[in-house]
Amino acid sequence: MKFLDNLTFGQYVPSESPIHHLDPRCKIACVLVLLTSIFMVRHTTSFIGWGLLLLVVTSFSRLPLRLVVKTAKPVLILALFTASIHIFFTKGTPVFSLGIITVTREGLRMAAFTALRLLFLVLFASFLTLTTKPMELADGLERLFSPLTRFGFPAHELAMMMTIALRFIPTLLDETDRIMKAQLARGAYFDKGSLWKRLKAFLPVLIPLFIIVFQRAEDLSTAMEARCYRGGKGRTRMHPLTWRTSDTIALLGLSLVTALLLIADRTLLP
Amino acid sequence: MPSHTVCELRDVSFTYPGAAAERGTKVRPALSGITLSIKDGEWVALLGSNGSGKSTLAKHMNALLVPTQGDCIVYGMSTSDADHVPAIRNAVAMVFQNPENQIVGTTVEEDTAFGPENQGLPPGDIARRVNDALAATGLREKRQSPVYTLSGGEKQRLAVAGALALDSSCLVLDEPTAMLDPQGRAQLLAVLAELHRGGKTLVSITHRLEEIIHCDRAIVLVRGTVAWEGAVPELFQSTEALREWGIFIPPLAALWKDLHARGITPLPSVPSLPEMVQALCP
């Protein structure tokens, strides 16, 4: 089960917070507002304000700050990479130079700016998956996209696919683990030799996995049919999504705060 | 009450499409000339070795497969008529061998709700059915648990809960105990026995004789035909035939048969282990 432990990134953490109880559609809209706003920020110093907003949202979500920050860990490398590119390749007033490399003041500022922007994007986006059950998220997306079904957009089908994919991730990880152990027992190595060799060693794992996936898909579709599944038409939900006043307040409140932060970014800072 | 017919097969034959074309030679049909009926409130065991057509027959009761020849009538509706299929699937629920491949939801509650949601019930009714189904299968405490945290036995009971939530009067189980450990098997059989007492019609497919002790009637399939049909105690008498059909006779049943033949035990049918102990050492 060691594979599962690495899969914590952005996974749902149950809690009874006000954010957990918001309608998933509201949360999706809020995240869209946040992401577009962050892209419109011009000054590095503005991120202090966004940092404060992050703290406020975290306290509302009743999640430990440590956990929220941890979700940004996987993108840290990407952030550092883009930052270093900016440090070394931005021309301007030199701060110091090492051989052919010259670090400029503009470069440092750009590096900090892009790294921070990337981190805040990921941090705010992670709240969506941290506070929303996968099924609710799929439901929310289905409802948001349902107006497009008139033009042939498969909203229900996509949501169902997402649900099934989420449901089968642990199952397939187990399956992979089992196949790998079976191969290890017969003398295969997955962690020795060159990258090419390791990739080649993985091929005998992937082929049985593929066959199993197709068999499972076949069985699952039979079982779904037996359980009266006939597509999205005429299907009801046990917990239908309900848009409450609190959702409207949350969306309007957040939009107001981000608007104020953006106005401050444009007017107060040079 | 137990005279009403749930499911009736009249001279049903079935050949898997494509099977004949691939091999070019004459292909044995998966089912041939099957005639049987299942009455309301009965618990019928469908026995047979691998490839005897048990699963194929089970799929006919839920209109997942339609006879190539003959008629399959469920509650007076022919499965060959596509208009009847939704009603038939509401009336006959199915549980398959591998629970992993029939669970759709990510949590216990979500999965149990999947069937009634498909039936288009109002939310209140769905919640009530989910409550009842989880109570009947002993999964109430696990309601919010993610599916991957369940044990094999719990997963299969969840599959049964999902079928119960459809509120069908008949439940067809295709080797539901095949992938379970002895404890999970015992728990599942206890759930089934309770459902039977509650008046549900059950058809359970198995090749384990020890699981059919509580059944009212047994049907043995051999190479796609009905080889034997009758009351369970009588089946245990025909040791030779069972061996011929490729069905393993559990030690307890063999013991009972020998004792019965010598007139030692007064028990009229194959007992459970405690009953046997009680009878031998009163």
Image: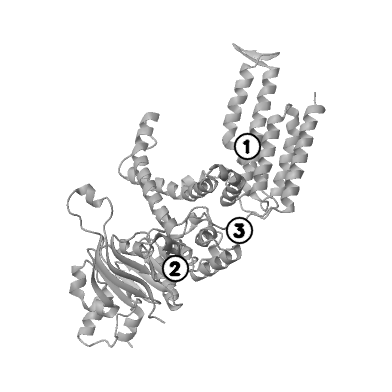
Is B39 located above or below residue A250 in the figure? below
Relative to B154, A264 lies left or right? right
- The verdict on a common chain for dots 2 and 1 is no
Residue that mark 3 sits on: A239
Residue type at the position of mark 2: Ala
Q: Can you tell which of label 3 and label 2 is closer to the viewer?
A: 2
* Alpha carbon separation for disc pair 3 and 1: 29 Å
For the residue pair B155 and B40, the one nearer the viewer reads as: B40
- Quadrant position of residue B261: bottom left
Q: Report the residue marked by disc 1.
A: A122
Residue at 56% x, 58% y is A236
Q: Position of A55 compared to B205: left or right?
A: right
Q: Which chain's residue wears label 3?
A: A
For the C terminus of chain B, which image quadrant? bottom left
Chain of the residue on which disc 1 is drawn: A
Q: Secondary structure at mark 2?
A: helix
* Disc 2 target residue: B91
Relative placement, left or right, of B30 versus B182 is left
The image quarter containing residue A67 is: top right
Q: Position of residue B25 (x, y in %)?
A: 17, 51
